[in-house]
Image (cartoon, rainbow, N blue to C red):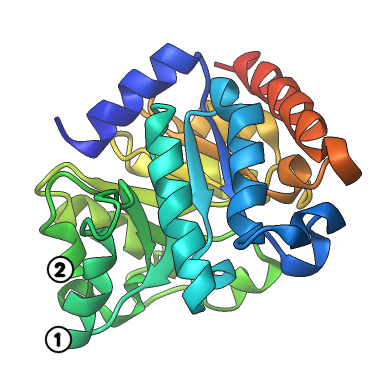
Amino acid sequence: MDFFERLGERIQRADSVLCVGLDPEPDRLPEHLAEHDLPRWAFNRRIIDATHEHAAAYKPNAAFYEDPDGWRALTETIAYAHGKGVPVVLDAKRADIGNTARRYAGLLESRGSGHAPDAITVNPYMGRDSLEPFLSREGKGVFVLCRTSNPGGADLQDLELASGETVYERVAALCELWNANGNVGLVVGATAPEELESLREQVPDLPFLVPGIGAQGGDAEAAVEFGLSGGTGLVNSSRGIIFAGEGERFDRAAGEAAKRLKKRLNRYR
């Protein structure tokens, strides 16, 4: 079973398209977690316990784990999420050429605990050969950056090419060609609802990972209406859930925030 088939099953089981971003900023972690050997792992475990029944997937961002203790925390987090039956998308935005690309794609291989991410985000700027080591892993999902949620995304993504299409439209067209293994999706921000709609018309069969809901104020209705393909897709919220509360009961607040957003998104499914 490929990644999007597994994700579709998880969406049905959880009755949710909510993806919870696990970005444990060290200076925002509750003080009482400092006594733990791996505070980020202790934080994530509590978040997963509180939110897993509402989550279709988790999305840890690699930037918050790129140190020795961080990678240990990430490994534990992936294994724990899998134990709850929830797939994991590693938000790494990787791409390169030759041996470097193959090493980056090694992030999708099982190590230590035997658990690896189920999918990864990648950057298409260097072209097909830079993504081939990811695309060739048939059982793993590959979400390609297309129209991102940050304001500066327009600096390059909205540029018009000689063909008359924008850069992000060209990326979407290429991703259809690159989807030989049925494992490609697009990252399209909820802060650009018009682009979401036009891209769904352009590539009706590619699932989207839609960030920008919550702290970034993205359009939840557009995220669901245009982000899903055949019912499969993900709408992500990170800070709006994991930092919904503070102190000893931070996890309860996260659980309530996830439950509310799941219900809100489900109104548009």
Q: CA distance from mark 2 to mark 1?
A: 10 Å
Instruction: Answer with the quarter of the image where residue 64 lies.
Output: bottom right
Whether residue 245 appears in this view of the structure is: no
Q: Horizontal and vertical percent for residue 129?
A: 15, 76
Q: Horizontal and vertical percent for residue 250?
A: 82, 39
Q: Which residue is mark 1?
A: 99
Residue at image position (73%, 67%) is 26
Q: Which residue is mark 2?
A: 133
Whether residue 182 appears in this view of the structure is: yes
Q: Horizontal and vertical percent for residue 140?
A: 22, 48
Q: The N terminus is located in which quarter?
A: top left
- Report the side of 257 relative to 88 (left or right): right
Q: Callout 2, which amino acid?
A: Pro
Q: The C terminus is located in which quarter?
A: top right
Q: Is residue 103 above or below residue 52?
A: below
Q: Few, some or many C-alpha atoms within 10 Å of disc 1 (few <14, some 14-19, many ≥20)? A: few
